Each structure stands twice: as structure tokens, then as C-alpha cells.
Amino acid sequence: MRCAGCISRLLLSVIPVTQPSLSLVVAVYNKPEALRFVLEGCARQSLRDFEVIVADDGSGDEVRGVIADAREAHDYPLVHLWHPDEGWRKNVMLNNGIRASRAGHIVFIDGDCIPSRHFLRDHWRERKTGHVLLGRRVETSDRWTKNLTLDDVRSGRFERIGWRELSDGLAGRSLRVEDGIRIPSSILRGLLLRSVTGMLGSNFSASKDDLIAVNGFDELYDGPGCGEDSDIQYRLSLLGVEGKSMRNLAIQYHLYHPATPVSAKCLERLRQIRETSGPRCAHGLVHEDGP
């Protein structure tokens, strides 16, 4: 059996010997300026013992330049995984991220989602055996995104919800602004009914052992919207891995772009998967059905 990593070219930084508490896998395809904001957000995390793995689905040289700048500016371990652009192969790169990770718990985000200061600390503190952590994100407005600066991220100003942010939310230009309010108390979150059950591929974390047990992400999905979240959540559930809500914890801010439609082909594959009883996909970390 041959793993998908054998056909990928991996551009790696020098990896320290010590094992981090968390691995943060950032799924990227172009959008270099968005990635610059995300990597700056990583630099101000309150939890310091982590590594960042950029899982790059074939971006151009601009993204490589952003990563080089981040390595010079920041002291956290930063790994760049890359393969040629041959269409949507995000799940291949996510599996490469699992392989490269050195921590026992892995957090997944997208390259246009900026983590708040306590994002990784919340994922670390809330981890629980037999659970996958289900986070949410604030969908920022076009105005918010266009006006964002690197200094806003460095200073933490981007996390402050003021009148303009509230106005964008009330007008429907931003969505789920209320999810940008961090509520550390589990009792208060329970009283406010602040829980969710569905997985977002841009904000979840799981045990590396559990991800390996389901053979990682199904690489036969060839488009966004369900293969990197709904599919793997379903297969984890077949192992008895339950979802744990992280709403109003592990807050992140999604930079505005027009909605990306889910392909009918991917939805049909998800429907077929949900009719099966096996937690392992055949074409994941290990290609059990051949090349």
C-alpha cells in the first residue's frame, strides 16, 4: 500500500527535536495576504508550545514569500508542505499535515481564518479523550476585511467588537458576530444554550490517534464543503468519538469572500459514505484500495 505523501513534494523547515503540545494545520491555496494575517495571529497566541504546519494545495511563489517572512519575524516552528496545483486536493494536503505533525492533538484551520489570542489555549484546555472539538467563526464583512491591517492583528484590535462591527452584523454584512464573544465559563455557555453539533473544517481539533484510526481525510473528494468536515466527523462518530462544542471559545475571524458552492458530486459522495458502517476511508492516509 502506498501513501499519498509519496507523490507530494514537501518543503520543510528544520524541525526542532522537542515535541509541541499542539500542531496547528493551516490549509492554504493562494491568498498570500490573508495568510500573512493568519501567521501574525499565530505569533500572539497565549499558548506558546505549538507548531504551525502550512498545508499548501499548490500556491504560487507569493505564499512561499509570506512564509519566509514569517519565519524571520516569529519564533514558533513553521513547516511548509506543498504539492503542484492539480485541482482541489485539499484533503491530500491535510493528510500530509497529519503525517508531519509532532503533537498528539491537531488543530485545523483555513488560511483565511485569523485565530484570536486564546484560540490554541482553548483547544488545548478543552481537549478530551474520545472527543473532537467543534469550533465556530465570525464571518466578517467586506468592509471589515478591506480595512484590516497587519497592525490591527499584532495589537489585537481585530478582536474588538465595536459599533461598526455590530452594525455590520445587524445589517447582515457580517454573520455570527456573537460568536466573537469569548465565554470561558462552561456553566454560562450552557445557560445561554451556546452549543453546536456540526463540524467546520476551518475550526476543529482532534486526537492524532483518532484521525489515524479513521485513515485521515478521504482524498476522493475533489471539491470543498463536506469532505474536510462532515465526512470525517461522521466517520469519527462511528468510532464513538463525540463532538464537543467550542462555541464562544477558540474564536476565529473568517476574512470575507463570496460563498463557495458545494459540488453535487461531493454531496453525492457524502450521501454514499453515510450509508456505510465503516469508519475508515479507503483512500486516505493509507491507500487501501491501491494507488
Image (cartoon, rainbow, N blue to C red):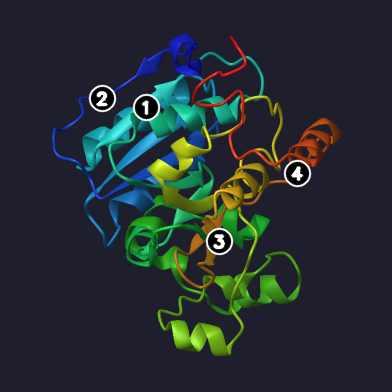
Q: Check disc 1: other Cα within 10 Å, few if <14, some if 14-19, many if 20+.
A: many
Q: CA distance from mark 4 to mark 3?
A: 17 Å
Mark 4 residue type: Arg
Mark 4 or 3, nearer chain start: 3
Task: Single out the mark in the foreground, 2 or 4.
Answer: 4
Mark 2 or 1, nearer chain start: 2
Q: Are marks 2 and 4 in contact (CB under 8 Å)?
A: no
Which numbered marker is on residue 243? 3
Q: CA distance from mark 3 to mark 2?
A: 33 Å
Mark 3 or 2, nearer chain start: 2
Secondary structure at badge 3 equals: strand
Q: How many marks?
A: 4
Which numbered marker is on residue 80? 1
Above or below, 118 relative to 183: above
| Residue 224 in view of the camera | yes
| Residue 36 relative to residue 138: left or right | left
From the image, tell me which residue sits under label 2. Answer: 13
Mark 3 or 1, nearer chain start: 1
Mark 4 or 1, nearer chain start: 1
